[in-house]
Image (tube, grey):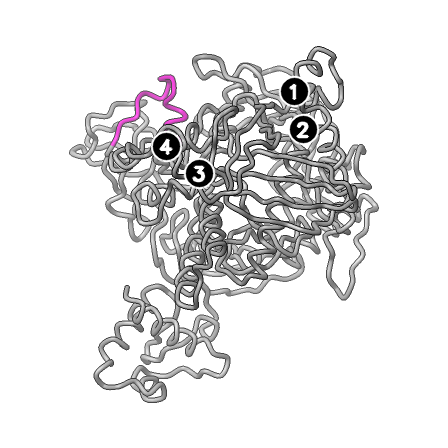
Amino acid sequence: MSELFKDRKEIILSYINHPEYVPLKRKEMSLLMEVPKSDMDVFDGILDELVKEGNVIETKKKKIMSLAQANMGKGTFLAHPKGYGFISREDGEDIFIPTSEVAGAMQRDTVLYKIINPAGAGKKADGIVIKILERGVSRVVGLYQPGKSFGFVVADDKKMAKDIFIAKKYTMGAVAGHKVVVEIIDYGENKKNPEGKIVEILGHINDPGVDILSIIRKHELAVEFPQEVYAEIENIPEEVLEADKANRVDLRDTLTITIDGEDAKDLDDAVTLEKLSNGNYKLGVHIADVSHYVHEHTELNNEGYRRGTSVYLVDRVIPMLPHKLSNGLCSLNPNVDRLTMSCIMEIDGSGTVVDQQICESIINSNYRMTYSKVRELIEDKTPELVEANKEIIPMLMEMNELRMILGEKRKKRGAINFDLPESKIILDEKGKPIEIHPYERSIATNLIEEFMLVANETVAETAFWQEIPFVYRNHAEPDDAKMEKMEQFIRGFHYYLKKKDGEIHPRELQRVLQDVEGKEEERVITRVLLRSMMQARYSGDNVGHFGLAAKYYSHFTSPIRRYPDLQSHRMLKKMLHGEFNEAVAGEYRDIVAEVSAHCSKRERIAEEAERDTVQLKKVEYMSKHVGEVFEGIIAGVTGFGLFVELPNTVEGMIALADLNDDYYEFDEKKMLVAGKRKGKIYALGDHVEVYVAKVSKELGTIDFMFEN
């Protein structure tokens, strides 16, 4: 699309969306907008495209209306295995779509919808699907089951409510039990099943590795890099060239360390610290200068953009960039020169950044430290370890001082600290899960987190006031309806939120989290608060970060594994070199908007894939414990069942239909179920004993029952 066409399209859409616009026919609109006759074909083409995209409506009387005037909206359809679904909206609560009004929509389709009954009294709005604008899924992974004259595939994604019909000529020789990839060739109309053709056989369902490979294919994650990318990186050197070291701030003589997990290979951040004579701290956060090697308009950059992020599955990492960069030239390994982008901050005793410098630099890291070593040095002060690392002990102690100062500053301004346990799954050499436990957080992980947070904020604030195009990391204020529902719930535990001018400051949520710390209801209330939050997203506009109570926030610290960080580095470099004029800035504002939208989507896909592999291995692990008894906590209450979480982070469900000692009714406000005859109550946060009743690898479910 030409820039002129794009500009005209935006002008026409703005005209139609104006509050004072009244529906007009095309000719009437063209006259009012003074469109020359010579441009009428282009004008009609733009309107056709806007209608096709679902951005405007053309009525039966041929009048053009905005979506708001037609009481319609555009959103993503999220399907349920039972046939109904929801429209996901960025600007509010989801909309319920009953089975009869789905109109053939499938998982992740972009649809045009109409609200029939608005939300109210704790009830979601419901509506109907008017039109499918774009299909969200073109390929499906599932289990092949043959028939006499045809076969069908049962999708792994249970949100695909219908099996996919496979004609004999499209089976590729698949047999019963094969996991396959199906390309949909007919989505099915009038309640017909979709039809497809098998394009890849992954292996038998019981073959080692097929389970994870199925998830990789389901989310269409690219594992191998295109040959064009490998051809390009042949020209990238193994070590930093002397010519590339020029015109940089030389920090090679500054004591520098990296702190990462034991298994980390892509070391993209290093830190330095100096206590100044005025009592302030000079903190340097040095990030791999990936943009020096990954240039715009190259296949390497294009592939990194397509991926958007590295994906951390339970048994592997699918990197955004090839290992030659991510584990080699751009990894800040010890005792080698590395090019970096540095954010060097002077921070006073209250945690305020009083001075800062963002620059292109070169470092030579002295120590490759791990979280466990740093924790042991700071907390345990193990003599042998202290002796081996005595050069950096004073700096580590000062880093710990600064960690506490920065943490206290964030706490005072109201940053919310959601500390829900993440899963650490240990696999054997065959990929079988042998141990599951919560991921351990420590002083060391918190130290690096605080330093990265302050760097991200400092960089974002600099970009904002310099008015350069930039990718911000925004976290919008919570939806009012979700907040109200959350408030009702925590009142049941005698916790209350104070409002100012009808608004809730994040400090209030932080106060509740502090109040519940160490109490039985801590995990449950933390989970409910977290679910009431909006999702963080990338944007070219700075909105601020509600959860961090930060006016400015960005992702600057991981360009090896996140494309938005890489894009932001490019913008900072252009700022440093004075390359922005009005034309260049305008061009890059469009680019950062596209990068933000694309990378927000890629982030969601990566998160789903990561969750799928974790759940897969949890189910596989629990399949060896059927019949065993565990203590757990009720972590979710719904109208159909209770979700119980075990101390090792595994979660399973007790279906209300399986509780045969009474008929249980669901109280949504109090988040509990109560027996109608005997009055027994099961509420969110209750500690319970359960046994593993059933595990289904095919469905990915774990069923618990109460221990009598």
Q: Are marks 4 and 2 in contact (CB under 8 Å)?
A: no
Left-right relation of 444 to 143: right
Q: Decide which of tag 3 and tag 1 comes sooner along the chain.
A: 3
Residue 678 picture location, percent across and down: 77, 35
Q: Nearer the viewer, mark 4 or mark 3?
A: 3
Residue 234, located in which quarter of the rendered image? Answer: top left
What is the spatial separation of the Cα atoms under label 4 and label 3, in whole angstroms? 23 Å
Task: Residue under label 3, please give it.
Answer: 245
Residue 242, located in which quarter of the rendered image? Answer: top left
Task: Residue under label 1, please give it.
Answer: 373
Task: Please identify the residue farthest to the left as the structure is shown.
Answer: 169
Residue 199 picture location, percent across and down: 23, 34
Residue 509 picture location, percent across and down: 74, 49
Q: Are marks 1 and 4 in contact (CB under 8 Å)?
A: no
> Residue 186 magenta-drawn?
no
> Residue flagged by tag 4: what amino acid is it?
Pro
Q: Do the residues labelled 2 and 1 touch (CB within 8 Å)?
A: yes
What is the spatial separation of the Cα atoms under label 2 and label 1, in whole angstroms? 9 Å
What is the spatial separation of the Cα atoms under label 4 and label 2, in whole angstroms? 28 Å
Q: Decide which of tag 1 and tag 4 comes sooner along the chain.
A: 4
The numbered mark at residue 322 is 4
What is the spatial separation of the Cα atoms under label 3 and label 2, in whole angstroms? 31 Å
Callout 2: SS: helix
Range of magenta residues? 200-217
Q: Decide which of tag 4 and tag 2 comes sooner along the chain.
A: 4
Whether 34 is drawn above or below 667: the answer is below
Callout 3: SS: helix
Q: Residue at x 63, y 43 (%)?
A: 453
Could you classify mark 4 by the number of other residues whose Cα lies within 10 Å: few (under 14), some (14-19), or many (20 or more)? some
